[in-house]
């Protein structure tokens, strides 16, 4: 339509050979869901349209819950979600998928950074080392000063000020929150007794709406600490998290490693589903254990075969090296570990296009 | 002109058109009632699972919203209601005196040219979208106002309202109230200005002729005349503040307490902002719950505006 | 006791528009002086300069002198608020304060200076002023009712009582009866006749019979054409004015041949 | 005058201190009012200033003539810009126009009923009471209403521009009714009588004389009502959705409006750049787009206000001589 | 040609309030009949029942008969809209349609009734009506200017032209000159004198000189007290009415002793 920024051909000259589809996809397709995926999806849409210029794709970052809701009404071709489908949702999907049940495929892996703003430390570009228990205690309001011995002991080389800690968390329901606190629940359950939820469970510190809210709040005052998708960290300080007996800094590759060291959740109901049980307690060399895995949810069969063709092509592109590279450039995500590739291909092949 | 004379007695289709037009006008009048009823009914139907649905699932939904703090709909909505009313009343309190001041300035103190320009600016400000107030409040005001709140907490902390320590950054009820006050200020100002301007000259002159100073004239003639208008303007503004979404969403650090610690974070949340915050990630039942809270908000604003209208009616009668 | 007013070479402006030109008039104390003349000739305008009410209209100003017992009201150091305390004013349409009771209306001016009026003082003052305005008998049983509940004529007398209660030296009245029915008009005219023993009274009226009935002196204002400034055409004692005016325009006006 | 109390007026003469006190009070209130005015100016000026300064940076022709398709991270688009708001402007205009089409005829006819036909009966008082009450409906409730109505009537998952129009029209309706009612009321009764006395039917009297005379006022009232709703965000997030390409079909598919665009860009906060990106890749671009779009929005609101006022002034029908 | 009007036992109500009681009057065709009487006695009210304009006021209704050439206007099958086309009306304050030009104002009655007039017919009609209202010479060069731009007297004549343009049989006028200056008044009075050869004219006036100058018959309305219904006190030809009234109240009124 009018005003489109048509991509130049240089971007996709290299990519055209890697796409297996011979006939380009055309038509209008829409998805909705996780806002965390937004930046990546923008890149994917641009990349996908490079080879399928007739495809018009829209993604509404309305949130995982709303995305799944909309998907289950049949209004969208796929949903992006920060968490895997619930059992009843799989059951519900029978009414929209013409055959079988919906399934999820991991497409987006992003480390969650523990960001902080502390005069003399973060503005000097330094990291702070913490183990899971310390982070959990901070976010539970048990540690309230930056020079608390629990922190200081792990950071002998830093001069920590006597500043009060202001915790900043998400105020809206969020997959980021759930993934973040599930790290505590897995690694240091004694220090995190709350139920697992997408809502922040206590009233420590301050809540802010969306990743953007957290980041801007952290930036606004000295002594703040929060958590956010790695791509939004900017020049804030990040916490290096203790894995095994080392403190590992956050990076895309480090995030990827924990997924490589994780198993699939085989308790989930339904076919073709690939749900990753993140191994937060990983001791893998150089792994950063706090990650968010976000899925794309599709049907194995659609009323409209065009939709099916699209879903198949879309997932194929998104999970390809090329797609993952695009996401990494645009959103700083971690690439899907190669161990998952064959499983993913198998699930995608399950989509019926005839 | 014989044909003209003939038709002059029987105008074409005039009577039917008359009836149809009257019917349409009548229908549109009735439609207002229908629309209001529809608002209520559709919200009610969509929120029905709260009442008629599986209560266990409901309480699970609520506890998932609140991280286990509340497990019943009322346990959820009442603190929200408290927060909503608290924030709005504070905003009204701040905006009220300032607005009356500006309105008097425009109507009785400023030179005519300046007054016209100011009126225009005030009307314009009423139309600035709330998302822009949200941007400004969240990014500019929050850091800028912290020193002030900190000062207040240090010096007036003995008053429970101002109990310290002041949250930094100040994403607090106090800051939100200031932003809402700025947002409703133009509403109160423009309505009271219009009323102040209508003060009968006679009454103003009566006061002046008795040897009243300007302020005494305002006290004797202008304020009593404008009283009911000021009240109803304030109620309208209160209604607007009660329903404000984006600015609260983008600024306030929410909590679910019955708390009046204005300078501390994570104390209260408003219904409207809560809907906007939870809606994206809510499942079917969650949406019902949120619409249930929306229904409560609707009823509250309904009552407030109803009172406002009744007050004006009484005063003009 | 009333005070005398002398107006010397007064020009009155609304913004740039010269509304009334070169007025010279001597108003005797304890007499009733009436201003008459065709509509728009500036009667109200001149009247309002006598207590500096003219200047509350944006852009309005005055040149020349208005001497109240020899003291120029327009001197730099004179506070207009104080002038208006000494010179009371009653308007064309009765204008009691709508939110106040009869009693509070009467006391409105006094309260400005005496925040804490003893109840007995207040009662005395209210009675005195209402008696002075010939209204006491009619309202003494309902002093706490709102002032606007009265009939038009009663309201006008209430306004006179309110003006009188601050004990001014001069009373200015701008067509005080034009909104009243004949009976109320009579009541107010009687009142004016009584008041002149205590006050200097200046009254604007459209009704020549009224001027003839109540005024000691009459000033006839006129204007040459619409858009031209008005001026004082002729000033005389009332008997001369109405029986044997020494001015042709005045004669034509009084005999009803124009205006 | 027997019974008249003797009054010693010297006791009530204003004392020097009383006069001084009153003058001080007068000045004090004047100062207070002036201070109130200045205090109120600070946030308002700050708000406008921030928006202008931040918004002007990216506000250019490119920004106005492209949408957000093919915009990846902080990279430049082939046209040399960083994406734009064309789709949001179109969405805003269409959705608002939809709201207009719904609420203006209904609101106007409702006002006609109230002023011309109702005889101020019980029904009319109820209606105008409810119109007043309706003007206080929170915008988010309007959004929930439209959302509920469309899910219940058209099945779940329905999101389109028109749904947004319905939500906005609910917010516009009372404003339109009120302002039209005011405008119809000030049409002198003389004119109605003059027309009726010519043997003109009531319907023609209303359409050709009353509405015609009130037209400028009605138009400017409607424009001001539009200015009020054009900046709504929350109800549109849930009803009209969000899309990065241009959708011109009001009745199908999602639509972005300017306020939603501002909010979405604010939510993105910052963009990433590929590791070896050159200087044309701007990581702060989402916030810059948000401010620029906010500025566009303010300018549109401003223009609407201006047009409303000009219409009211220039085309005002002089009913008084 | 004008038509005759006979009013029989007419009672006129505003809601429950009986405003005018038992009016019986015979209005001759092609004559000018004037209604006079003190304020509030119901002159306007009666006038407005003659073209069923009374009933547009909510709650207002009429009992009794008004016969236009023998046909009762208040019969069930009579369309009030049609009545108003046969009986034209001119109001106290000139009220040209502000959105229309002079020309369109004259044509309003025809055009608003949905007739499509050929341009030449329209031109003829405009000239005829404006000549009839003595206005043609003054406005013929600016027919497309807004009607509201004329002076008060011209506006009133424009309103008469507008009423005349629909070819009524009767013309009702409610104090058509009270908002006009003497010269315009004269112009309108002259016009009325000319019009009576074509129309039956009923005119309400406060000005007895005017009634004496232009009316053939005069009806004197009166009311016993405020709040009581008004009634037709005395009806006579104008010469009798003003020189030798056979009714005491009428005589008092005319000699200016009350009202
Ligand atoms: N507020 C005003 N602004 C500008 N001009 C004014 C104002 N008030 C009066 N004028 C003008 O001043 C002149 C004198 O007006 P003024 O009201 O004093 O006349 P008046 O003799 O009292 O008339 P009336 O008998 O109608 O009350 C007139 O030309 C009038 O138009
Ligand atoms: N719209 C109305 N509703 C109720 N009562 C009315 C209405 N119009 C007039 N009246 C009453 O009807 C009576 C007659 O009024 P009307 O206007 O006919 O008197 P009038 O003789 O024309 O007086 P004027 O000379 O002042 O025009 C009065 O008592 C008046 O109060
Ligand atoms: Mg005057
Ligand atoms: Mg009348
Ligand atoms: O992507 P979020 O669920 O953290 O908003």
Image (spheres, coloured by chain):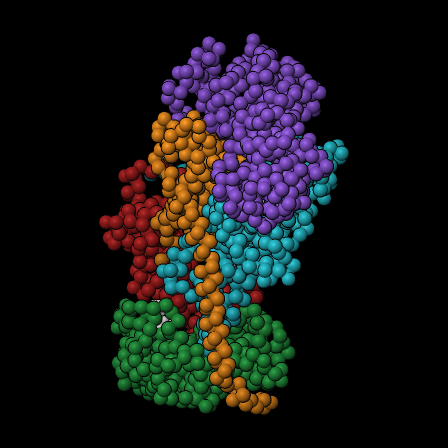
Chain colours: A purple, B cyan, C green, D orange, E red
Report the residue at 51% width, 35% height from top.
Answer: A232
Report the number of numbered marks: 0
**Which residue lies at the image location 65% right of the left edge and 39% below the top edge?**
A134
Eyeballing the image, is D52 above or below A25?
A: below
Residue sticking out furthest to the front:
A157
Residue C223 x/y as whole percent = 28, 73
Q: Is residue B313 left or right of residue C206?
A: right
B40 relative to A328 in the view: left or right: right
Q: Is residue C163 above or below residue D156?
A: below
* B221 to E63, vertically: above or below: below
Residue A275 location, quadrant: top right
Viewer-side residue, C112 vs C41: C112
Q: Is residue D129 above or below residue D285?
A: below
* Residue B284 pos. (x, y %): 66, 31
Q: Residue at x 42, y 47 (%)?
A: D50
Q: Quadrant of residue C6?
A: bottom left
């Amino acid at each position: 339509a009018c005003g489109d920024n048509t991509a130049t051909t240089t971007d996709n000259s290299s990519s055209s050979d890697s796409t297996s589809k011979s006939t380009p996809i055309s038509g209008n397709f829409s998805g909705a869901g996780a806002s965390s995926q937004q930046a990546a999806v923008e890149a994917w849409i641009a990349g996908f349209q490079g080879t399928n210029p007739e495809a018009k794709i829209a993604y509404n970052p309305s949130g995982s819950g709303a995305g799944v809701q909309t998907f289950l009404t049949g209004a969208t071709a796929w949903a992006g979600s920060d968490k895997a489908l619930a059992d009843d949702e799989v059951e519900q999907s029978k009414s929209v998928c013409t055959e079988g049940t919906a399934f999820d495929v991991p497409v987006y892996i992003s480390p969650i950074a523990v960001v902080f703003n502390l005069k003399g430390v973060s503005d000097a570009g330094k990291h702070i080392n913490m183990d899971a228990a310390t982070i959990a205690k901070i976010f539970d309001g048990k540690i309230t000063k930056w020079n608390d011995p629990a922190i200081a002991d792990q950071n002998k080389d830093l001069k920590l000020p006597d500043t009060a800690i202001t915790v900043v968390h998400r105020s809206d329901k969020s997959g980021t929150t759930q993934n973040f606190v599930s790290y505590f629940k897995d690694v240091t359950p004694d220090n995190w007794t709350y139920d697992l939820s997408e809502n922040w469970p206590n009233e420590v510190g301050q809540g802010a709406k969306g990743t953007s809210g957290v980041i801007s709040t952290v930036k606004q005052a000295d002594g703040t600490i929060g958590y956010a998708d790695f791509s939004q960290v900017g020049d804030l300080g990040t916490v290096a998290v203790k894995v095994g007996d080392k403190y590992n800094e956050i990076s895309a590759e480090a995030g990827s490693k924990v997924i490589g060291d994780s198993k699939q959740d085989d308790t989930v109901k339904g076919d073709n589903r690939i749900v990753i049980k993140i191994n937060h307690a990983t001791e893998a060399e150089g792994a950063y254990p706090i990650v968010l895995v976000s899925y794309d949810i599709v049907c194995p069969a659609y009323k409209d075969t065009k939709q099916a063709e699209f879903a198949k092509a879309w997932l194929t592109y998104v999970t390809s090296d090329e797609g993952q590279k695009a996401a990494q450039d645009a959103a700083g995500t971690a690439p899907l570990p190669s161990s998952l590739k064959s499983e993913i291909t198998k699930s995608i092949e399950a989509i019926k296009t005839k | 002109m014989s044909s003209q004379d003939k038709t002059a007695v029987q105008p074409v289709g005039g009577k039917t058109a008359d009836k149809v037009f009257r019917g349409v006008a009548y229908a549109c009048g009735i439609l207002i009632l229908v629309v209001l009823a529809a608002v209520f009914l559709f919200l009610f139907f969509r929120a029905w699972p709260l009442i008629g649905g599986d209560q266990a699932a409901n309480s699970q939904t609520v506890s998932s919203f609140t991280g286990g703090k509340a497990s019943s709909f009322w346990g959820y909505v009442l603190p929200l209601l408290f927060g909503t009313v608290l924030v709005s009343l504070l905003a009204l309190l701040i905006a009220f005196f300032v607005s009356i001041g500006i309105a008097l300035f425009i109507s009785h103190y400023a030179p005519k040219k300046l007054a016209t320009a100011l009126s225009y600016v005030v009307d314009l400000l009423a139309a600035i979208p709330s998302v822009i107030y949200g941007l400004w409040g969240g990014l500019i005001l929050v850091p800028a106002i912290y020193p002030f709140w900190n000062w207040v907490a240090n010096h007036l902390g003995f008053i429970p309202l101002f109990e310290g320590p002041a949250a930094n950054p100040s994403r607090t009820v106090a800051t939100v109230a200031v932003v809402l006050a700025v947002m409703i200020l133009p509403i109160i100002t423009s309505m009271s200005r219009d009323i102040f301007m209508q003060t009968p000259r006679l009454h103003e002159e009566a006061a002046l002729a008795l040897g009243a100073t300007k302020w005494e004239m305002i006290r004797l003639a202008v304020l009593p005349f404008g009283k009911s208008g000021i009240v109803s303007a304030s109620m309208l503004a209160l209604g607007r503040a009660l329903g404000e979404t984006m600015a609260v969403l983008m600024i306030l650090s929410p909590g679910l307490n019955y708390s009046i610690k204005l300078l501390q974070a994570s104390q209260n949340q408003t219904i409207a902002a809560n809907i906007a915050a939870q809606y994206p990630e809510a499942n079917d039942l969650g949406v019902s719950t949120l619409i249930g809270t929306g229904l409560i908000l609707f009823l509250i604003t309904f009552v407030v505006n109803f009172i406002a209208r009744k007050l004006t009616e009484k005063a003009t009668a | 006791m009333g005070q005398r007013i002398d107006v010397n070479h007064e020009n009155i402006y609304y913004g740039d528009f010269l509304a009334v030109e070169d007025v010279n008039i001597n108003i005797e104390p304890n007499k009733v002086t009436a201003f008459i003349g065709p509509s728009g000739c500036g009667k109200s305008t001149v009247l309002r300069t006598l207590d500096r009410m003219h200047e509350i209209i944006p852009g309005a100003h005055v040149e020349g002198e208005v001497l109240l017992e020899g003291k120029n009201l327009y001197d730099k150091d004179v506070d207009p608020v104080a002038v208006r305390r000494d010179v009371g004013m009653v308007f064309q349409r009765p204008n009691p304060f709508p939110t106040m009771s009869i009693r509070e209306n009467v006391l409105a001016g006094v309260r400005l200076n005496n925040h804490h009026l003893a109840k007995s003082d207040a009662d005395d003052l209210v009675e005195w002023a209402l008696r002075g305005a010939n209204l006491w008998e009619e309202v003494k049983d309902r002093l706490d009712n709102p002032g606007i509940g009265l009939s038009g004529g009663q309201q006008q007398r209430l306004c006179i009582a309110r003006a009188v209660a601050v004990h001014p030296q001069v009373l200015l009245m701008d067509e005080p009866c034009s909104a009243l029915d004949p009976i109320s008009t009579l009541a107010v005219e009687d009142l004016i006749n009584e008041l002149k023993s205590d006050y200097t009274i200046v009254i604007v009226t459209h009704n020549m019979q009224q001027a003839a009935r109540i005024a000691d002196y009459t000033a006839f204002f006129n204007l040459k054409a619409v858009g031209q400034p008005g001026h004082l055409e002729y000033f005389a004692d009332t008997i001369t004015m109405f029986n044997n005016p020494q001015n042709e325009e005045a004669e034509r006006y009084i005999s009803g041949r124009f205006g | 005058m027997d019974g008249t109390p003797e009054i010693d007026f010297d006791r009530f003469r204003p004392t020097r201190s009383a006069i001084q006190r009153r003058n001080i009070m007068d000045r004090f209130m004047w100062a207070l009012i002036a201070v109130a005015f200045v205090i109120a100016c600070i946030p308002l000026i700050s708000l406008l200033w921030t928006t202008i300064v931040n918004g002007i940076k990216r506000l250019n022709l490119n920004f106005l003539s492209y949408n957000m398709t093919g915009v990846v991270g902080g990279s430049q688009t082939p046209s040399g810009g960083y994406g734009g708001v064309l789709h949001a402007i179109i969405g805003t205009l269409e959705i608002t126009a939809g709201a207009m089409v719904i609420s203006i005829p209904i609101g106007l006819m409702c006002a006609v009923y109230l002023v011309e036909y109702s005889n101020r009966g019980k029904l009319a008082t109820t209606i105008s009471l409810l119109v007043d009450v309706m003007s206080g409906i929170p915008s988010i409730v309007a959004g929930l209403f439209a959302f509920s109505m469309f899910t219940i009537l058209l099945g779940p998952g329905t999101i389109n521009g028109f749904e947004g129009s319905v939500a906005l029209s609910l917010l516009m309706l009372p404003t339109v009714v009120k302002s039209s009612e005011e405008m119809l009321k000030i049409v002198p009764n003389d004119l109605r009588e003059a027309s009726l006395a010519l043997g003109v039917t009531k319907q023609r009297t209303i359409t050709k004389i009353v509405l015609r005379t009130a037209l400028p006022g009605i138009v400017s009232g409607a424009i001001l009502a539009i200015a009020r709703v054009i900046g709504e965000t929350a109800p549109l997030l849930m009803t009209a959705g969000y899309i990065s390409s241009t959708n011109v079909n009001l009745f199908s598919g999602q639509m972005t409006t300017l306020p939603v665009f501002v909010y979405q860009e604010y939510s993105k906060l910052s963009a990433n750049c590929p590791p070896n990106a050159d200087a044309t890749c701007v990581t702060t671009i989402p916030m810059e787009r948000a401010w620029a779009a906010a500025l566009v929005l303010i300018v549109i609101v401003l223009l609407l206000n201006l047009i409303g006022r000009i219409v009211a002034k220039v085309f005002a029908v002089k009913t008084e001589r």
